[in-house]
Amino acid sequence: MKTLPKKKLAILVSVLIVIIVAGSAGTYYLTLPNNSESPLPSPTETQTASPTQTPTETATPTEVPTPEPSTQSMDNLRLGDYANYTVKNYANGALIAEYPITWIVAEEAYNGTDCWVITVTADVTSENSTTTTILYWYMDKVTYEGLSMKSQTYVDGALVSEDESEFSGPPAYIDPQTIVGQETITVSAGTFTCDKVVVTDAATGSVTTQWYSTDVPIVGLVKMETYNGAELTTARELTASGR
């Protein structure tokens, strides 16, 4: 088995981080409010006091519960769905890496369970050599429970590592409170009306802005930008999608 050079390993680590960040969009659809689950309470009727009764005190308005995230739209996955992205990494204002990432939905049985298989592929070319990282997420087609995650890494077509681990479910939820509004944006794949999400990393202080649309299959991500202070460090843009 070919040994992975240190420089290649560093690039691979950065690619994996980017893929995992992209994965957080996988549950975007779970965060959409489902108003049917949390109906607004009917106004409390104020009783009219009779001549022989002490006037009834008007009830304190009932606090409206915050709608819970809906789980009804996770059926966004369809066989053959795909979404292609271009990722750009920057350092000190200069572009240091640019590479494609592809998401595809397939189906396959895993230990007797029919699964959606979300395949994420990243190809990074550096110094006339290409490192390809592929992640396979196996999810129960009925319950969407995560069953397994497999990874493979190739250098110039030769397999250098592979691994399998437990996969407890879709990547981390996107907090609905991070949705700051809607914007219509244009990227290589077209024009989309998006929910805009802004998240600040408490540990690093970096700020990531993401734009999501339900018109984009699989993860819903249209565009993403991460800034460390005033410096752009990572950008991702949808280049094509379909089902």
Image: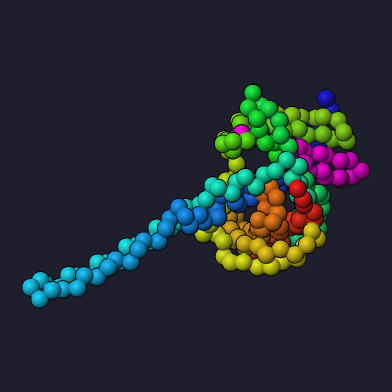
Front-most of residues 173 and 70 = 70
Instruction: Using the rendered view, name the quadrant where residue 161 is placed.
Output: top right
Q: Residue furthest right?
A: 128
- Where residue 102 appears, x then y in whole percent? 78, 46
Q: Nearer the viewer, residue 30 or 52?
A: 52
Q: Is residue 117 magenta?
A: no
Q: Is 5 placed above or below 74 here?
A: above
Across and down, in percent, residue 90 comes to 76, 57
Farthest residue, direction left: 52
Compared to residue 93, the image places residue 102 above or below, namely above
Residue at 89%, 40% in the rendered image: 129
Residue 171's place in the image compared with 41, above or below, is above
Where residue 157 appears, as percent x and y from the top left, is: 87, 33
Residue at figure coordinates x 78%, y 34% from the top left = 153
Q: Which residue of the protein is positioned furthest toward the bottom in this rendering? A: 51
What residue is drawn where x is 80% and y is 60%?
188
Say whether residue 99 is visible. yes
Residue 137 percent location from the top left of the image: 67, 36
Instruction: Identify which residue, 235 or 82, lies in the foreground.
Output: 82
Classify the position of the N terminus by image quarter: top right
**Viewed as shown, does residue 153 lie left or right of 214?**
right
**Magenta-colored span:** 119-140
Q: Quadrant of residue 51?
A: bottom left
User: Residue visible at 73% across and 37% down?
Assistant: 106
**Magenta-colored segment: predominant secondary structure:** strand
Q: Is residue 29 above or below residue 160?
A: below
Image quadrant assignment for residue 233: bottom right
Residue 129 in the magenta stretch? The answer is: yes
Left or right, 217 with reference to 131 = left
Number of numbered discs on residues: 0
Asked whether residue 7 appears in the rendered view, the answer is no
